[in-house]
Amino acid sequence: MVGSVSDSQGDVICVGLVVADHVCAPISRFPPAGELVTTRSLTLTIGGCAANVAVDLAKLGVSASLVGKVGDDVFGQYVRDELERCGVNCRGMSISPTTQTSGTMVVNVQGEDRRFIHAVGANAELTGGEVTDGDLAAAKILYVGGFGLNAALSGENVAQLFQRARKHGVRTVLDVVVDHPKMVSEMLPAPLQHTDLFLPNTDEARMLSGLAAPNEQAEHFLKMGARTVIITQGPGGALLQEQGRPPVRISSHAVEQVDGTGGGDAFVAGYLYGLLKEASVEECLNYGAASGASCVQIAGATTGVLRAPELEAFVAEHRLGVT
């Protein structure tokens, strides 16, 4: 059952990247060295896979908590204040006394994919061991986001965390960020054996598997141990494949993309919202597609994401076919 945020860690525990994003409204072109280009606005927003998913879930009325690290600085204070304002349980957040809050400069250029300049910051200190058995006992889903960018959140650490989660009957969900493909490929096998849902986009899946076709990518990760794989493909929709079943495909909503940041995280949140409602695969995919589409139409990783009544109304009116 989807509920409201409480003092417990909640239905979904999100573990991983917490970032202060500095997002520019789309500029006409990327400037060469020494040149200035103006933008309509520069916005400070929540970022990082785990933080984005936690905020998106809270907007959907899901009881969500966040386990992550920030620095003892103004950006860390902003991140925590904004997360709590959005209804995220931050009892699992900790402050590094020595390292700055992680930050990303998100540069949007009209007609081009976004560019990122990232400082890992305090995220580098997160191991996953911060999640207690008591936290897991009260949860239904454990989501690890941004796996692969932080060496301390290692394959072995996430595998142990997922094993503990499964002992408590908690579904395990893994999302990746591929900065160094070889490093992530080496980290991935251990946790994937204990992963109920793996959600790379097709570019990440190609780098990790060496395969171009989404169905082949999904098969590759299923053979590595994941129970269910969803390959998101942006405007190309998404493909879901489970062990022993044929693949399921869904298209995407035709919307104008202003800022693609957080679109994949919004898809994850919408899909998990459906899972908690015990909805069908088709409904879960529709929730994911609608949530992702709402995100990319407004600058910021979580700004435009629909709330539950809006999401339900949108899906009812604009349901996508699943094949």
Image: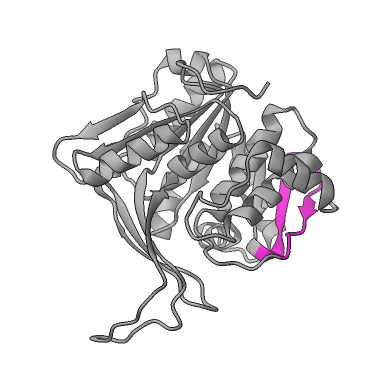
Q: Nearer the viewer, residue 183 or 314?
A: 314
- Give the x, y percent position of residue 82: 39, 39
Looking at the image, residue 286 sits to the left or right of residue 301; the answer is: right
Most foreground residue, 289 or 173: 289
Measuring 75% from the left and 40% from the top, which residue is drawn there?
312
Res 117 → quadrant: bottom left
Is 158 situated above or below 112? above
Instruction: Kindly identify the residue that appears in the image at 47 percent across and 16 percent down.
Output: 8
Vertical relation: 218 (above or below) 164: below
Q: Residue furthest left?
A: 98
Name the spot of residue 14 as percent of width and height, x first.
47, 33
x, y (%) of residue 318? 81, 53
Q: x%, y% of residue 85?
A: 42, 34
User: In this rendering, does residue 251 appear at all?
Assistant: yes
The quadrant of the rendering that contains the N terminus is: top right
Residue at screen point 34% across, 84% down: 31
User: Is 298 situated left or right of 239 in this image?
Assistant: left
Q: How is the image coloured?
A: one colour
Q: How many marks?
A: 0
Report whether 95 appears left or right of 271: left
Q: Nearer the viewer, residue 274 or 110?
A: 110
From the viewer's perspective, tell me whether residue 56 is left or right of residue 48: right
Q: Which residue is drawn at the image coordinates 73% and 65% (left, top)? A: 254
Residue span colored magenta: 235-254
- Dividing the picture into quadrants, the one containing residue 122 is top left
Magenta-colored stretch includes residue 248: yes
